[in-house]
Amino acid sequence: MGRVTSVNISERKGEQKHPVPEICLKLRHGIVGDAHAGDWHRQISLLAEESVDTMRSRSPLPLNAGVFAENINTRGLDLKALPVGSRLRIGETEVEITQIGKECHQDCAIKRAVGRCVMPTEGIFAVVVREGTVRPGDEIEILEARV
């Protein structure tokens, strides 16, 4: 079982996200107040702190929560190993994984400074299956890992 370490939003696309006390997940929408919300397959992004930790030792920049534009930081789960279609319970909510990694449209400041960015290969994306609120400290449970 894993835990949420941070929840993050941005008001505009193309910006780093910033931590907030909680996020509200809404069906067919994603995170209320987040620039990437909408009825599409990448409503929410998740990134494991373990992935960020691999970058921290190499980065001259501080790698705070949201720096990779992720909505939810986690600890204790190998997110990138979960197949598309897997379902996670996050606090009182439930999400379904729709994509692993993403194509970077332009080199971000992290990649320019460090030579590598983890979001394209280790970030995951999901849609909301059950609405509710997510806060740092909430437990994350794998409900169904599709193969």
Image (tube, helix red, strand yellow):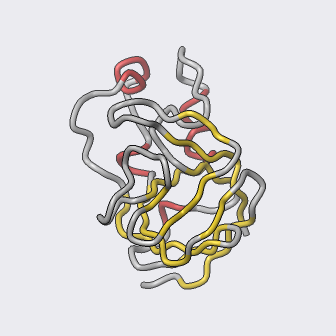
Horizontal and vertical percent for residue 29?
Answer: 40, 63
Residue 84, image quadrant: bottom left
Looking at the image, residue 144 lies above or below residue 141: below
Foreground pick, 37 / 55: 37
Which image quarter is the N terminus in? bottom right
Left or right of residue 116, residue 79 in this image: right
Q: Tag count in the figure?
A: 0
The part of the image, by quadrant, that contains residue 6 is top right
Q: Is residue 126 left or right of residue 3?
A: left
Residue 64, x across and y down, in percent: 61, 29
Residue 5 percent across, percent down from the top left: 70, 48
Instruction: Work out which quarter of the rendered image holds the C terminus and state it.
Output: bottom left
In this rendering, would 138 be left or right of 96? Answer: right
Q: Is residue 55 above or below residue 118?
A: above
- The residue lying at 55 percent from left, 45 percent from top is 51
Give 119 or 129, whichever is nearer the viewer. 129
- Judge whether 65 appears above or below 98 on screen: above
Q: Residue at x 52, y 82 (%)?
A: 145
Query: In the image, what residue occupies the spot 56% across and 33% down?
Result: 18
User: Which of 68/27 is in front?
Assistant: 27
Say whether residue 144 is left or right of residue 121. right
Q: Residue furthest left?
A: 105
Q: Which residue is at a point 21% across and 37% down the rendered structure image?
A: 105
Residue closest to the far right? 137
